[in-house]
């Protein structure tokens, strides 16, 4: 995917971000910038630190050192300085988080329409008819039939749950979306369909996305830039096609070679 052309200031900035668990490194000394409309993929094997990094960026974990800055109306704000109310408002309105296990990102006892409608209510929607109409429209966008709007997610397949989670997160048109292995655990045919959907919706909305994946094919399809992590450190970063077509680090070369040999 070609890099977006933007002279805007970064939307999210990490400076010297580290998380330690005693002597064990979750991630260490990570610097990054994410710009509006840009998709950044963070790749690496299990245990490389990529999920820890995502949790730090999304404020689910507090860093041992370093900081995360986010551009708000009054400029870049240190997320650690936000009140709990400000942080929760950010998570409900300007951010989305699509999780690998859709059950963690949905309210399983609430209807499909209710899952989508809750996000709309968080940004001020109050008219029931309008909320239901918008939820129906978004279910259609993620290929869920309108007559399933009152079904709860427990009646849905894994792929449908993931599509519902995407609708729930994107309905408020967030500025920034975190994705943690969004196609993991799904059948190959379902993965391909879901990836096409994600790419289309992200492009339409112009949202910035940080996606964690172990799958280099997912990174190539969706991202403008890529960061490769190993043992909690970023070992290589750059434009996605450049890094994957001409990897410089032996570990990255091994990852690319393993895909080609598969």
Image: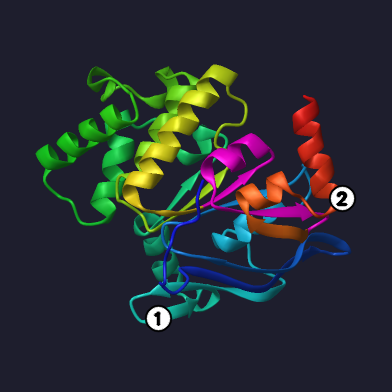
Position of 247 compared to 239: left or right? right
Q: Position of residue 173 (x, y in %)?
A: 31, 51
Of the pair 43 and 24, the residue shown nearer to us: 43
Q: Which mark is residue 6?
A: none
Residue beneath label 2, please? Answer: 250
| Residue 197 among those drawn in magenta | no
Q: Position of residue 21 (x, y in %)?
A: 80, 61
Residue at disc 2, secondary structure: helix
Residue at disc 1, secondary structure: strand
Asked if labels 1 and 2 touch by Cβ distance under 8 angstroms, the answer is no
Cα gap from disc 2 to disc 1, whole angstroms: 39 Å
**Residue 8: quarter of image:** bottom left
- Name the residue: 85% across, 64% down: 22
Magenta-colored span: 210-232
* Residue 108 seen in the current view: no
* Residue 1 seen in the current view: yes
- Image position of 15 with respect to 262: above or below: below
Residue lying furthest bottom: 74
- Name the residue: 69% across, 45% down: 244
**Residue 202: quarter of image:** top left
Placement of the C terminus among the 4 image quadrants = top right
Position of 117 compared to 231: left or right? left
Q: Which mark is residue 75?
A: 1
């Amino acid at each position: 995917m070609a890099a977006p052309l933007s002279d805007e200031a970064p939307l999210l900035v990490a400076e010297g971000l580290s998380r330690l668990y005693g002597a064990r490194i979750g991630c260490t000394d990570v610097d990054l910038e994410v710009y509006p409309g840009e998709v950044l993929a963070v790749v690496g094997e299990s245990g490389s630190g990529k999920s820890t990094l995502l949790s730090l960026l999304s404020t689910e974990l507090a860093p041992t050192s370093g900081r995360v800055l986010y551009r708000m109306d009054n400029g870049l704000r240190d997320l650690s300085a936000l009140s709990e109310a400000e942080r929760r408002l950010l998570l409900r309105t300007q951010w989305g988080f699509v999780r690998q296990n859709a059950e963690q990102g949905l309210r399983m006892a609430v209807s499909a329409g209710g899952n989508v409608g809750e996000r709309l209510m968080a940004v001020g929607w109050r008219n029931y008819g309008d909320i239901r109409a918008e939820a129906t429209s978004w279910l259609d966008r993620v290929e869920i039939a309108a007559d399933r709007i009152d079904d709860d997610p427990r009646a849905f397949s894994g792929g449908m749950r993931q599509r519902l989670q995407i609708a729930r997160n994107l309905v408020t048109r967030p500025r920034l979306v975190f994705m943690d292995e969004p196609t993991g655990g799904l059948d190959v045919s379902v993965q391909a369909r879901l990836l096409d959907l994600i790419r289309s919706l992200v492009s339409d909305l112009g949202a910035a996305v940080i996606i964690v994946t172990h799958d280099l094919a997912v990174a190539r399809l969706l991202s403008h830039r890529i960061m490769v992590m190993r043992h909690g450190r970023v070992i290589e970063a750059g434009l996605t096609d450049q890094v994957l077509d001409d990897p410089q680090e032996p570990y990255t070369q091994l990852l690319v070679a393993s895909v080609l040999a598969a």
